[in-house]
Every structure is written in C-alpha cells, then in structure tokens.
Image (tube, rainbow, N blue to C red):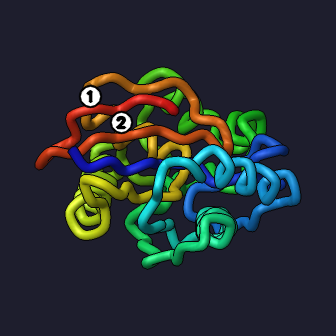
C-alpha cells in the first residue's frame, strides 16, 4: 500500500478572523509558520520522499517549511489542490455573509447550496481525487510516502469522496494518512 499524508496549511490572519478564504491567496501568519514547523516534527519519523502543495501561498509556504525541515524538495505545486471556491462569500465572516447575502447564506446553511461564483462539492471532490491519484501514482512509493499540503475543505472533500463520510472540521496543521492501492483504501487522522 502506498501512503500519502494530507495536511491542512498553517493559520492565516483570515483563519484567525473567521473569514472565508477559498481561492483568495492569503499568506501564513506567524502562528501558521509555527504550525508548519510542528507539522514537520510530526512527519519527521515517517520517511517522506516528496511534498506537493496547492499553489496558494498559505499551502505552498507550509509545504516549503516542512520540506526544508525534512531535507527534501517540494516536487511541484498544483492549482487543482486549491481550496473550494466560495464565490461571494470569500473574504467575509459568517455574520457578513448573512448580512450581505442573506438568501445565499440561508441556502448554504440549510442545503449546502453553492453561493454565487462558488464551486460545487462534486466538482471539488472530482478535482481532489484526480490530484491525489497523480501524487499516489507518481510520487508515493511502498517504502516512502508523499505529503500533500492542501486546504481544510479540500481535504474533507477528498476523504468524503473516498469513504462516504464527511469528517469534522480540519484544524490548521492537521494531518491525515490515506492509503492507496489503485484507489483510496484507508483514510484516518494522524
């Protein structure tokens, strides 16, 4: 079985403020950089071979910090590992979403209906599955796992697509292990 670890990027100022980020490119803050160093320490004994990251700076910087700490390279960045696009909600807090886009916000709460300009859960899951398969096939080895640094919603969508169960919210710096045998056969938090 090939193993791929998936990690959520470290914290940003928008995470701390409760703002929806989506595709908006917000950098790590100092707490996020510390979380990336802690992530490297957790992954250090696992014999990682390579690291891949979303092209958004919060994930890419997290990946660079981990890779540097482990003495390996970031193999590539991949825009298909980005967070879900949240359209009109991006940059807003939940209270601001409700105040500025009340109908769309209520549809999100009641039915998880995609806001205007946003991406559907199915589209997110499909692109994450394809991106994960590329890493599992091209970089992970039976004796040397790979790491993907992505986003909370993207990680959850991938796990849900593979297992049929949506995991709880994923914290900044949290890591999951996924096993690959031609498909995802195992998914669990580390």
Which residue is tagged 2? 159
Up/down of 25 relative to 94, above or below = below
Count of residue discs? 2
Query: Residue most toward the left?
Result: 182
Q: Quadrant of residue 36?
A: bottom right
Residue 128 appears in the rendering: yes
Where does residue 21 sit, x and y in percent of width and height? 65, 55
Please, what secondary structure does the residue beneath circle 2 have? Answer: helix
Q: Nearer the viewer, residue 144 or 181?
A: 144
Left/right placement of residue 165 relative to residue 31 reads left
Q: Residues within 10 Å of mark 1 (few under 14, many from 20)?
A: some
CA separation, marks 1 and 2?
A: 6 Å
Q: Nearer the viewer, residue 70 or 19?
A: 70
Which residue is drawn at the image coordinates 25% and 53% (left, top)? 142
| Rendered-image quadrant of the N terminus | top left
Which residue is drawn at the image coordinates 40% and 53% (left, top)? 119
Where does residue 73 sit, x and y in percent of width and height? 52, 77
Left/right placement of residue 113 relative to residue 129 reads right
Pointers 1 and 2 in contact (C-beta within 8 Å): yes
Which residue is drawn at the image coordinates 37% and 55% (left, top)? 145
Please, what secondary structure does the residue beneath circle 1 have? Answer: helix
Q: Which mark is residue 30?
A: none
Q: Nearer the viewer, residue 71 or 15?
A: 71
Q: Quadrant of residue 60?
A: bottom right
Q: Which mark is residue 163?
A: 1
Q: Quadrant of residue 146?
A: bottom left
Where does residue 102 sit, x and y in percent of width and height? 64, 34
Residue 14 appears in the rendering: no
Where does residue 171 sit, x and y in percent of width and height? 65, 36
Up/down of 101 relative to 164, above or below = below
């Amino acid at each position: 079985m090939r193993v791929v670890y998936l990690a959520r990027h470290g914290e940003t100022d928008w995470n701390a403020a409760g703002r929806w980020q989506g595709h908006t490119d917000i950098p790590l803050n100092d707490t996020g950089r510390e979380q990336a160093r802690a992530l490297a320490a957790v992954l250090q004994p696992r014999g990682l071979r390579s690291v891949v990251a979303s092209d958004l700076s919060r994930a890419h910087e997290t990946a660079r910090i981990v890779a540097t700490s482990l003495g390996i390279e970031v193999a590539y960045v991949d825009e298909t590992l980005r967070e879900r696009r949240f359209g009109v909600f991006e940059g807003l807090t939940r209270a601001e979403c409700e105040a500025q886009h009340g109908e769309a916000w209520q549809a999100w709460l009641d039915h998880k209906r995609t806001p205007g300009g946003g991406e559907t859960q199915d589209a997110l899951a499909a692109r994450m599955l394809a991106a994960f398969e590329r890493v599992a096939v091209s970089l992970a080895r039976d004796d040397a796992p790979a790491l993907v640094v992505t986003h909370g919603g993207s990680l959850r969508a991938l796990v849900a697509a593979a297992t049929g169960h949506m995991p709880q919210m994923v914290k900044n710096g949290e890591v999951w292990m996924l096993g690959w045998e031609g498909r995802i056969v195992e998914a669990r938090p580390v």
